[in-house]
Amino acid sequence: MIRSLSVKLSLLFVGIALISVGVIALWVNHTVRSEFIMYCQQGCSTCGSHPQEVVFAMGTQEQAFLDAFRDSLWLAVTVAVIAAIALGLLFGRLISGPMRQLSFSAKKIATGDFSQRVTAKTDDEIGEVSAAFNSMAEQLEKKEKGRRQLLADIAHELRNPLSIIQGNMEAWLDGVISPTPEQIASVYDETVLLSRLVTDLRELSLAEAGQLKLHQKAAELGELIAAEISGIQSRCREKKVSVSAELSDRLPQVFIDKDRIRQVLHNLMDNAIRHTPAGGSIKISACLDKQGWVAVSVSDTGSGVAPEDLPFVFGHFYKADRSRQRGHGGAGIGLALVKQLVELHGGKAWAESKVGKGSTFYFTLPAAPKFEIPSTNS
């Protein structure tokens, strides 16, 4: 069985050419011979009434003409066949060449070499396949770089609390220092941070894979916002930051998983507190937009985010301020989790910011239907 696409295409072209040329040659030979005999019959006064007698009426010149014509015809057929074979091989290579390159590059990508690209020389279907392959390879390369960066960031975030815990434990075991309540509390804080980081990473991975279960039902968003504000009042007083809420009078119920949206609100408020200096303010607002969704915003008067950093604030472990110390900044996945949880509800999340004036984070939630809908998992 022939496996080469180039050979298959070449044989196909040659076969079509042979059939076409053979049919034309036979038809032309038969037609010319019939017409020439009729011509001789009409021009010969000595021929009989039967057509077969025409052959004997033709002279040597007429017979030589037919023989020369037949020879020329078969010569033309031979040249046409040779040309068909050459063109078949050429077109076969032209078509199969990009396919071989695609196959080679695909095998390289399968081994982990995501830098492979193919050259799209034409604008036809093969060119479209090449362009689609290059786009796929580019996306795979970006995802691979993101995966490696994510692993490096996770290792970095896990290493810091583990190093602190390990260092203190070794010092206590060796008797270098005696554990004090303050040191024990510091180690405990690191374990809490480590536990929260692992939990957030698990939830983020489940959300991105679409495997995080939601238990949605109608809920009052105002109650969740009031509870969140009440929970952060002590932190705001310590940092001397004011917090307020502005809710629409006719704010409808939302169809949400209360625990997940409470987590969204907490992450956004925590982010606002960390980036708002003393004397600043935080405001959370909610209203019904024109599309029938409930739009929520969390605004702060912090330092803001630079325009070049704004598109990446919802990325994994992204920190606009690289000099921020661990004790003053989050792990960098809180906003990524916000985006995934909101999108699981069918909404969207985005941010606006001005350097030196603060930032506003928005997200939308589906309004609850008028009739009772049982809880569902998605």
Image: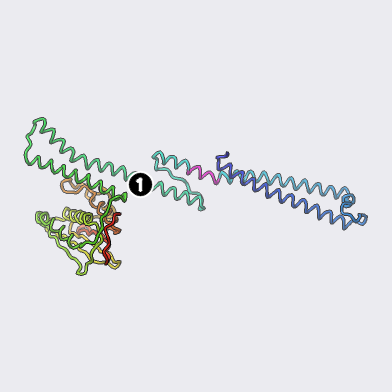
- Rendering coords of residue 107 (x, y %): 44, 40
Q: Residue furthest top?
A: 174
Q: Residues within 10 Å of mark 1 (few under 14, many from 20)?
A: few
Front residue of 306/213: it is 213
Q: In the picture, which quadrant includes the C terminus?
A: bottom left
Q: Quadrant of residue 34?
A: bottom right
Give the side of residue 135 with respect to residue 146, left or right: right
254 above or below 75?
below
Q: Is residue 169 visible?
A: yes
Q: Quadrant of residue 281?
A: bottom left
- Rendering coords of residue 329 (x, y %): 18, 49
Q: Is residue 303 visible?
A: no
Q: Quadrant of residue 37?
A: bottom right
Magenta segment, prevailing SS (helix, strand or loop): helix
164 above or below 305?
above
* Residue pictured at 15% horizontal, 62% vertical: 244
Give the side of residue 232 with respect to residue 209, left or right: left
Extent of the magenta region? 94-102
Q: Is residue 357 magenta?
A: no
Q: Residue furthest right?
A: 46
* Residue pictured at 19% horizontal, 48% vertical: 330
Which residue is label 1 attached to?
142
Q: Amino acid at mark 1?
A: Lys
